[in-house]
Structures are given as structure tokens and as C-alpha cells.
Image: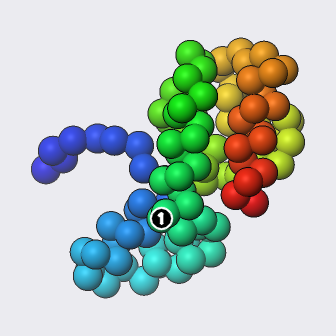
Amino acid sequence: MIKSSQPLTLAEVKEIVKESGTDVKEMEHYLKTFCVLDLKEAKEMKKELTDLNFMALKEEYIIKIVDFLPEDKEDLLKILVDVTVSEDETNKILDVVKKYR
């Protein structure tokens, strides 16, 4: 039974899987392959992006930015498909991402 639903970064999922102690080899392999940041870095980056207080930057988008670490405006706009962000906002988001690449 699902008790709640909340977007999580891959780093957060990795920590939950590790703490659960369940045998989920495929998921662990996936997370080791695609999860670039450790939990501390992911949380710090998530907080920095949240602190930008951009109206269009919902939590779901922040999570995907943390997971995918877009390299440029084109990559970022693939994540933000149904919202509009200014050039200045785009640059500020990418500046945060660059700190963690």
C-alpha cells in the first residue's frame, strides 16, 4: 500500500535501497551506473536550486536537474519542457549545476 508520494533524487533512492537491506541487485546496478552525486551533494544542490525561488522551477524539475546534471541550455530545456524560463534563470540554474559536475 502506498502511503505517500514524493519526488526523490537518484541519490536519495540509492540511500533508501541501501538502508532497506532488501536484495534488489538490478536497482542497485542501475543506481551505481546513473547516480553521479552522493546523497550530501544531491541534497545541497537540491537546496541551492530551491533557494533560487523561480516560480516555474517545481520540485519535480529540480529532482530531474539534480539527477541529469544538464550541461547546457539545450539539455536543461529538455527537462523543463512545459515551462518557460528566462535567459537569466537558465544561466543561474546552470551555474548551480556546474558546481556539482
Residue that label 1 marks: 39
Residue 54: in sight, yes or no? Answer: yes
Instruction: Name which residue type carries label 1.
Output: Leu
Looking at the rendered structure, the number of numbered marks drawn on it comes to 1
- Name the element at disc 1: helix
What is the x, y in percent for residue 20?
Answer: 25, 75
Q: Quadrant of residue 18?
A: bottom left
Residue at the image position 56 percent from the left and 61 percent from the top: 41
Residue at the image position 72 percent from the left and 48 percent from the top: 97
Residue at the image position 15 percent from the left and 44 percent from the top: 3
Q: Is residue 31 above or below residue 67?
A: below
Using a 10 Å C-alpha cutoff, classify the residue at mark 1 as few (fewer than 14 neighbours), some (14 to 19) or many (20 or more).
some
Asked if residue 65 lies left or right of residue 24, the reply is right
What is the x, y in percent for residue 80?
Answer: 68, 29
What is the x, y in percent for residue 11?
Answer: 49, 63
Residue 64: in sight, yes or no? Answer: no
Asked if residue 69 lies left or right of residue 63, the reply is right
Q: Quadrant of residue 48?
A: top right
Asked if residue 84 lies left or right of residue 62, the reply is right
Asked if residue 6 lies left or right of residue 100, the reply is left
Q: In which quarter of the image is the C terminus?
A: bottom right
Residue at the image position 59 percent from the left and 37 percent from the top: 49
